[in-house]
Amino acid sequence: MLEQSINIPAMHSVNVFGRFDEYAKKIEKTLKVSIVARESEVKIIGQDKAVLMAEGVINTLIELSKNNGVVTEQNVDYALALALEQNQGAMLELDNDIVCRTIAGKPIKPKTLGQKHYVDEIKNKMIVFGIGPAGTGKTYLAMAMAINAFKNNEVGRIILTRPAIEAGEKLGFLPGDLQSKVDPYLRPLYDALFQIMGPESFNANMEKGLIEVAPLAYMRGRTLDNAYIILDEAQNTTPAQMKMFLTRIGFGSKVIITGDQTQKDLPKDTTSGLDVALKVLSGVEDIGFVHLNNKDVVRHPLVQKIVKAYEEYEEKEERRKKKIEEGARYNRKRKTER
């Protein structure tokens, strides 16, 4: 057994331990330690290794509180995950890697190692595929990188596109003209632009044609030079659409393609253009592939649990189907031998 003491400045104790000590209880439960706080002194009691991990987590949260003035549940969960992976110092490195700031001055930065790898690949590669479940920041970070490049005059315009695939409802069901019908499919892109650029700057650049938000079908027949191009929801493209999009790329352009292979809205038995592209382009130089997972989810912690539960369920179903197919092959073989 080991007992370790830490001094926490009073102004940071609520941030680090959470309301009603909810963060402290989470640390205790995860690492199997006891945390006793008396004024600014905190004692951690438990097995040697667990105590040292808890000390590292708490010190990380103190630094985050000093830097940001706030510690979220997601910060605590990720600090614990890194501690269990023996990679405690990585979280503070992430905190210093600012991509850009929103119109309100809030810094946008990678919050997980997977997101940092994603941002680094975007910086270094001409084309990057960002693959992962909902909530991993694929689109938002790509938008932040695009806007930052645009503000720094690295590109002349931003083009944002996604396939207008009907997820259970028909386009004709929606009121208004064609633009009104496709706008709901592009709404997540508008929301991110408003938050990072502000509506006035966004509208001014839209009117000048420097920012374009359009369905993927509008990309056909064009050559896109000196642009930052983001294709969102790429899992809903067909192979022909993906090939059409990738062959639009001109000189001085950077392309980010984001998608979630588990959330396809394509008609049954239709192959996803994203799946095909990942196989065809895997050996092509200057193309980056980043696979994010449930550890990179930065929405409410419950979303992380939901994503993990679905991943486990899908893996179990895949094993079950494989077992059934193997059994069927075995039975066919037995019949042939007879």
Image (tube, rainbow, N blue to C red):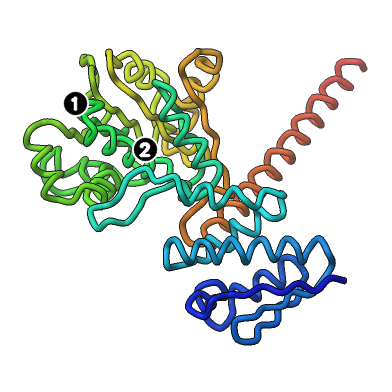
Determine the image quadrant of residue 265.
top left
SS category of the residue bearing label 1: loop
- Of the residues shown, which amino acid type is indicated by label 2? Ala
Callout 2: 10 Å neighbours few (<14), some, many (20+)?
many
Do callouts 2 and 1 mark residues in contact (Cβ within 8 Å)?
no
Q: Which one is in front in this view, the residue at disc 2 or the one at disc 1?
A: 1
Please give left or right for residue 277 compared with residue 180 in the image: right
Q: Residue furthest bottom?
A: 38
Give the residue at x 53% y 66%.
73
Q: Which of 45 and 299 is in front in this view?
A: 45
Please give left or right for residue 198 compared with residue 82 in the image: left
Give the residue at x 14% y 38%.
178
Measure the C-alpha gap from mark 2 to mark 1.
16 Å
SS category of the residue bearing label 2: helix
Q: Which of 127 and 154 is in front in this view?
A: 154
Note whether residue 304 is visible. Answer: yes
User: Residue 146 placed where, x, y %?
Assistant: 30, 35
Residue 132 is labelled as: none
Q: Earlier in the sequence, mark 2 or mark 1?
A: 2
- Of the residues shown, which amino acid type is indicated by label 1? Gly
User: Residue 191 placed where, x, y %?
Assistant: 26, 50
Give the residue at x 51% y 51%.
297
The image quadrant where one finds the C terminus is top right
Which residue position holds label 1? 156
User: Residue 174 placed where, x, y %?
Assistant: 20, 48
Please give left or right for residue 80 compared with residue 328 in the image: left
The image quadrant where one finds the N terminus is bottom right
User: Residue 230 placed where, x, y %?
Assistant: 32, 31
Which residue position holds label 2? 142
Vertical placement of 55 versus 272: above or below?
below
